[in-house]
Structures are given as C-alpha cells and as structure tokens.
Amino acid sequence: MNFLHMTENNFSLKKIEISVSEAEKRTGRNAMNMQETYTAYLIETRSVEHSDGQSVLTDSLWRRYSEFELLRNYLLVYYPHIVVPPLPEKRAEFVWHKLSADNMDPDFVERRRIGLENFLLRVASHPILCRDKIFYLFLTQEGNWKETVNETGFQLKADSRLKALNATFRVKNPDKRFIELKHYSDELQSVISHLLRVRARVADRLYGVYKVHGNYGRVFSEWSAIEKEMGDGLQSAGHHMDVYAASIDDILEDEEHYADQLKEYLFYAEALRAVCRKHELTQYDLETAAQDLAAKKQQCEELATGTVRTFSLKGMTTKLFGQETPEQREARIKMLEEQIKEGEQQLKSKNLEGREFVKNAWADIERFKEQKNHDLKEALISYAVMQISMCKKGIQVWTNAKECFSKM
Amino acid sequence: MSGGPPKALPSTGPQSLRDMPHPLAGSSSEEAVGGDSTPSPDLLTARSFGDKDLILPNGGTPAGTASPASSSSLLNRLQLDDDMDGETRDLFVTVDDPKKHVCTMETYITYRITTKSTRVEFDLPEYSVRRRYQDFDWLRNKLEESQPTHLIPPLPEKFVVKGVVDRFSEEFVETRRKALDKFLKRITDHPVLSFNEHFNVFLTAKDLNAHKKQGMALLTRVGESVKHVAGGYKLRNRPLEFAAIGEYLDTFALKLGTIDRIAQRIIKEEIEYLVELREYGPVYSTWSALEAELAEPLEGVSACIGNCSTALEELTDDMTEDFLPVLREYILYSDSMKSVLKKRDQVQAEYEAKLEAVALRKEERPKVPADVEKCQDRMECFNADLKADMERWQNNKRQDFRQLLMGMADKNIQYYEKCLLAWESIIPLLQEKQEAK
C-alpha cells in the first residue's frame, strides 16, 4: 500500500507516498511554560511521477504526538460516520517485565514511529478521509497548522460526553445492526485486552526459560576444566546453550510487532463504538423531535377543540386565574401551527439525515470489516511464521548441542 | 510418559500396580522365565540412536539368552564389552514389574529381579525373585561391609517426604525402578562385586529375610581386616593420584549440584510458562466465537497453542523423571566415593604409623615385622582396587553423562518438533480463502 491518492484542492489527484521516517528527542516549553522533553517525528511526503514511478520529496515536516491527536479528534468530529483509524497507544501498556514502560525508551519510540506511520497510511488510503483538507495541511503545512485546525471550530461541534451518554440510555429504537455492532465492539475490546495481557505474561515466562539455560554455559565450561575426554564436548555444548539463551531477545522483539497489530484493532473497537454512539445520538435526536412535534400537535388540537385531555400548566392557571380570551387562544393556535410546520420540516430533514448516516456509516463499517478480516488473518499468519522460526532455531541449537554431547 | 500415544517398546512395568498376594509366597524360580522378559522402556535413548537394529528381539542377544533388549542397556553392554577385552558376558540382571502390596502393617512396592547366568556360582541358569527397597538397602550395606576397598554404586534416596511425593505414583515407582535397575547392573558389570556372595543371595534366595537373620559372615579377607582398621591416624603423604581424585570429586560434586539446581529452575520456569499458555490458548477460542470469517483461523490458533502446551508438559515430565534422578544419583555416588577415599587414607595412615613406630624402636632386625607387612599388604590392595574402580567409574561416568545429556537434548528437540508440526499444519488453514457465503 505504498501509492496513495490524495486531493490537494479537490481538483487534482496525486499519487503520494507517506512515511514517518525519524524520531527525535526535543526539549521545549509546554503550555504552563515548564520545560518538557518530547519526541518529534519526521513526516516525509513523496509525490510519485506517473511516467517513471520515481518519487520526489515534496514535503517534510516534524510533528509531535499531540498534533496527531489533534488531527484525529478533528476527523472524529467531522466524519462521525467513519470508523476513524486509531493512534498507537499514548503510554506503553501490556508490557512484560523486560520492556520498559518509559515513553522515552528507544524501542517504544521506534514502535510508536511505525504506529504513527501506519495511522497516516490508513487515513490516506481511506476513500473519504484522504480528501480532507486539514489532513492534507497536516502533511504539508508545518507552521500554523494547529491554529488552522482550531479555526474550524471543531471542538464546539463535538458532542458532549454527557449528551452522548444520555442518548445511549434513552434512545428507544436504534437500528438493530448498531446494537449488535456495539455489543461486538465491547466483546472485541474485552477479548483483545485479555489476550494482550496473557501474551505479555507468556512472553515474560518464555524469557525466563531461555535465560536460565544460559547458566548451563558457565557451569559446563567450569566442569570441562576438570575433565579430560569429556572436556571439549562439554565446552562447545555450553557455547550453544549461551546462543540459545541469547536468541530469545530477537524472538520477543518480533512478537511485539504482533502485539502492536492486535493493539491497533483493540483501539479500532473504540472507533466502532464512536460510530454507534453517533447513531444513537442522531436517532435520539430524531425521536425527541418527533415526540415534541407530536406533543405540539396534540396541544394544538386541544386548544382548537376545547377539550383538555392532558394536563398542562396553562390549563391549570387558566382554571385558577380565569379563561383566556378567544384572541389569545387564536394567537396561541397560530403560533403552534407555525411551530408544527417548522417541526415537520425539521423532522423530515432529520429523518433524511438519520437515514443517510445509517447508510454511509454502514458502508464504511462493511469496508472496515473486510479490512479487519484481512489484516488480522495476516497478523495470525505472521505470528505462526514467527513461531515456526522459533521452533526451527530451537531444533538447530539443541541438535548442535546434542552433537557436542555425543563427542564427550 | 503417562498414558500417551503407543510407544516403541512395550513394557509391563509401570502400567499396572495390581495388588498381589505375598511376594515371596507365589513366585518361584523354577517357572520358566525365558522369553518373558520385558525390555526396560528407555525410549528416549532408543530414539536418539534411531537405529532399529539396536532394539533386538528376544533371543537376539549373545549366549542365546532372551535378555532385556533396551537399546541403551544393550549399547552399554556392548561398550563395556570393549572394556572387558572381549570377555563374554555371563550374567544378566533386570529389575522390572513393580507391584504394590497392601498388608495390615504397611503398604510397599516390590520389584521383580530376573537373573540369567551361566556362572558356576549360580545353581540354576535363571532366577526370578521379588525384592523391595529394604532388600536393596541391605545388599548395599553388606557390599560396603564386605568390599570396603571398592566403590559401591549408590541407591536412589531412601526417604521421601510424605505428602510432597506420592510413593505409589506411577512416575515415582518408575523412576525408582530405573535407578534400582541401574544399581544392580553396575554391580553386575563389576568384576569383583558381581561375584560377591551377598549379591548372589540377593539374586537367588527365595526367602531373603531368612538369610538376613542368619547374619552371614562371609567377608573377604581384606574386608575382614579393613573392618578393624583403627581410626585416628594422621596421614602424612597422600599419594598425588588419590589427592587428585579427591579434588576431582569435590569439584565434580559441586558442578553436578549446580547443574541440578539449574535443571530444577528450568523445569520450574517451564511449568510457569505452561500455566500461562494454558490460559492463553483458550482466549483465541473465546475470540473465535465473536467472529465470522476469522472464526476458523482463531480456533485453529487456539488448538495449536493447546498442542504446544501438551508437548511442553511432556518435556517437563520427562526431565523430572529421567534427567534429575540420574544427576542426583551421581552426586550420591561421589559422596560415597569420598568416604571410600577416606578409608583408604586411614589404612595408609595406619601403615605409616606402624612403620614409623618400628623405625623408632631402632631394632636391627632386617625384616619388617609381620603385622606391618600386613598393613602394607592391605594398603597396596586397597590402592589397586580403588585405582581400578576409579578407572571403571570414569568410563561409566563418561558414557552415562553422554547418554544423559544427549537425552536432554533429544527431549528438547522432540518438543520443538512437535510444536513445529502444530504451527506448520495450521498455516494452510490460515491462508484459506473464505468461500462465498
């Protein structure tokens, strides 16, 4: 997935390559004017010429993690029907003891660099997201980009958590598919978390097994010193034990890539849930509007016919303080009729919006499902290949050791 | 080791612990035992040599006797034959068929001892008796008493902590059986010990307890005299070679101890790894239940991890049962050898003291008094026996450790091969394209 398409200004499509090629430690001052250390990442964009396939460096700028976050938050607000690709984790989680949980650790930084590159590639290869202007500017406009994003006012457009929570509880008739999807994403998140936790423990234990074998190297060497015929065989076998013990470092480093692939989909589950939440909000909004409209219609009818079927404060006060005049009543009816007209319009458009949302969201969800199945299958295959390689190495080492023992 | 797939060599040994009437009542050596012998299930060595020819069927061994045909013991015998300069073997002993006996006072295990020999010291060509650990202990004590100038092989540990180890579990009994078999074979291979009267009684007597009570007093000449060596003499000059042996044994025991600790630690880590694997595999299964297209691949991975877990369990069981006991045996061996060396020192010390006493008396008699001569004789016999035994011990040790360590390498190779097979077989499943639903 090297060649991606992007629009610069909705007029031309370019083939481009994106890479996050470097990471650098920087110091600066944060919002509270305190000195801080952070890592900056170099993003390089290359334009690919059609004719010869050669790529030319067109843009290169440095971004830090918080800017990636800003970009993603913007995308979440402006594309609520899209399953927005997740960022790599902010802090190292699911670590096993040898890896440090320190954000400045070079291995962590390296894996994060890869994760950020992956994020950009995912966005750039998405049929809709790749056309976004802010995304384009993220890749091309180093200075002022933050201001540009903030100027869109996207933070204001964001749905409040409280509003979303309220909608989740009170929505009456959400699309069944979204209920299932939400359930699925909850389960997926739970099972992948569990998997990652246990995998970290497994890695920890495996590390221990391999490293203890290293002790054989030393003791065989010491033992060989007092032996005559057995000495050489023991000594060389000990060397193989050292090799065995050392081999686990690379093996587990490779496995971290597998864990990162799983983590991406762990975080994708959250993105799925975000889409479901948006649907619930839209649906709740629609239901509320329909309810309000129905209430107004009823009110209107009551006023017109004079029957009071439902309790209303106006009705009460009217009883207490006297009837209103027919003119007042007429005025009220007129107002209500206007409101009803407006309400009907709004309901129509909200209905349309709701249906559009469902249609578009579901299209992207289907796209996402395909991607997920493909990616996870690939991940499992590469995991199996890693295990096979580990087994072969093990057989090799022990066969070598066995040969040394046979010469004892 | 426990109820796995059918193995290469059949064994009646640990498969059945049936209760039986009193061991010494029923079995008789007159029963034809030939052709019924069971090979000791030393499967791993069989596989390490990978040569079917080594596993000879009954009747294929020299002297036309049906003998235990495990490839390892066969190979041992073949190699020892070289040591004996082509001497034909005329004594074969096997320990097998453990059985549990439940009596009012106690419960214990007996083992069948099968002996085949053409030696004149044996009245019959074949014997089959049943013995319990106590009897082996008696034998070893008697050998130590009667052959103090020789190195007596060790027995597996006498005491086991009750509650921690199940004395009647198949694994424990099998491990012990192997060690007892090794014990008797080492004595069998020894040119002096194998002719010991007590050994003969052990192998042949129907009622060993009666013999024990008689308190046989058939000690060799040297044994008798060494028994009465007074202690407390200070040794002046330990000959270099015995000093070297002493130092060697010290370091050797130390290194073995370290290896034992490392091996135990590895097993412990492997078991903890296994515990995690057993939780890890099923999570893929849980995930598989959530998915459609990914269901089969995930389930496949889960099964694969399950297979690896089983293979790992087999590895740890094997190492616990086959590797650790042999290490411990050799540590015990070096301990008992150290005490024999000490005895030798004492004999030499006594001789030196007596010699010095004579010199101090400044007698003009040209001849050395008889008792000093006896001391010298004693010392020189001891030195000769010990040297010969040390050489034999070194050779055996070399073979035993070669076999042991190759076995360890083998077990690990097999473990990885099983895992490799599991993962390779799942690749096609993972790569399968989903059929259009």
Image: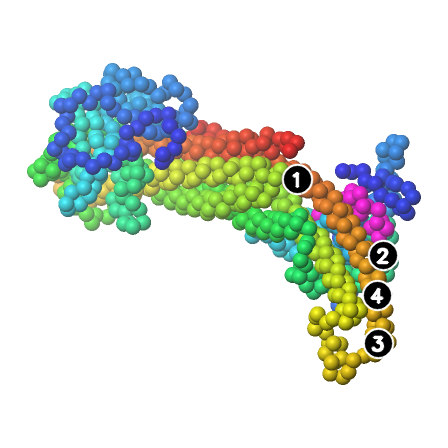
Q: Disc 1 residue type?
A: Asn
Q: Residue A12 placed where, x, y %? A: 91, 42
Number of the label disc, if any, that sits on residue A326: 3
Q: Look at the numbered disc 3 and give the secondary structure of its residue.
A: helix
Where are the magenta residues, as a range? Answer: A114-136
N-terminal-most mark, 1 or 4: 4
Residue B320, picture quadrant: top left
Q: Disc 2 residue type?
A: Trp
Residue with the most extreme bottom position? A321
**Nearer the viewer's eye, disc 4 or disc 2?**
4
What residue is pinned by disc 2?
A145
Q: How far separated are the C-alphas under marks 3 and 4?
A: 16 Å
Q: How far separated are the C-alphas under marks 4 and 2?
A: 48 Å
Q: Residue A309 placed where, x, y %? A: 70, 70
What residue is pinned by disc 4?
A337
Q: How far separated are the C-alphas under marks 3 and 1?
A: 68 Å
Q: Numbered disc 3: what chain?
A: A
N-terminal-most mark, 3 or 1: 3
Q: Disc 3 residue type?
A: Pro
